[in-house]
Image (cartoon, rainbow, N blue to C red):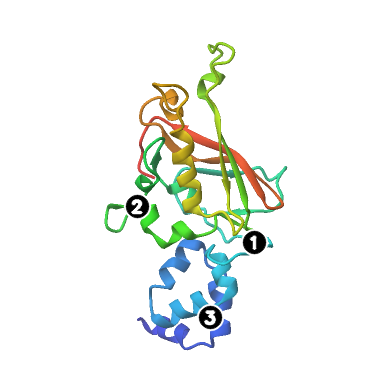
Amino acid sequence: MSPQSTFFADLPPKIIVKVLLKLPYPSLLVVQQLSRKFRDIIQQDPQLEVSLFKKMSKVYVEPVDNSKLRGGILRIDEANSEPVRLHPALPIVDYVLMLPADSAVLWNKRTSTEIRLLDLAISNDFISIPVVTLLKIHVHDPSLDTGYMMPGEDVSFNVVVKNPKGVRLGDFFRKLDAASNIKVDDLFRRGMLFGDQVHYDGLHEMKRKGLSLTGRILLSNSHERK
């Protein structure tokens, strides 16, 4: 480590924690890989564990700026929602509707490789702070917006995730997989009615009320590296 890093590592753990709590989520992931001491501090401090979405929290925790984290869309309806902080990985997962949940991937810029979300420890992270036990996401039929749909042809559906111990990232994508593969007749499954290669592109209109979180999913027909 550099002299500056060595000086920082020699500080009392309480001081280190105060500094680390000011770091955004991606930076915390990097810091815990710098040394065993930093890893142990982050994994053993309750506040830092909450900030990494690994420890259940029943109260809102003010987020650190994650504006540099690029990806899809993640919008909270702040005017109608109780305070909530959503997992920063949600807008950067690439997933195609109807494919198995284990095909959801994150792009590793350092190695230029795709990593399966369900192979990562973060798949067990809570989806929000505070923790919710019910997640209901509406998958909107885009043809409803064109005005060319006959009555009764709406193929919109909801993804409902329940976990009394707190909804996690992996829970959501497993349920999205299952919900998009439900058969609507002998030939079609839900996801087929949206077209080929329809990509999950993030979440919007997210609202929390107590232990429930609702919102809408964004879809696109193009694959752009997030």
Residue at position x 62%, y 58% in the image: 131
Q: Amino acid at mark 3?
A: Ile
Asked if marks 2 and 3 touch (Cβ < 8 Å), the reply is no
Is residue 189 depicted above or below 56 in this figure? above
In percent of width and height, residue 52 lies at 52, 65
Q: Which mark is residue 16?
A: 3
Residue at position x 52%, y 53% in the image: 67
Which residue is identified by label 1? 62
Lateral position of residue 55 relative to residue 209, left or right: left
How many numbered circles does the render carry? 3
Q: Amino acid at mark 1?
A: Glu
Q: Which mark is residue 116?
A: 2
In percent of width and height, residue 185 lies at 45, 21
Lateral position of residue 130 relative to residue 69, left or right: right
In percent of width and height, residue 61 lies at 65, 62
The first of marks 3 and 1 along the sequence is: 3
The image quadrant that residue 165 belongs to is: bottom right
- For mark 3, give the secondary structure: helix
- For mark 2, give the secondary structure: strand
Q: Nearer the viewer, mark 1 or mark 2?
A: 2
Between the residue at mark 3 and the residue at mark 1, the CA separation in whole angstroms equals 19 Å
Near mark 3 (Cα within 10 A), the count class, few <14, some 14-19 or many ≥20, is some
Near mark 2 (Cα within 10 A), the count class, few <14, some 14-19 or many ≥20, is some
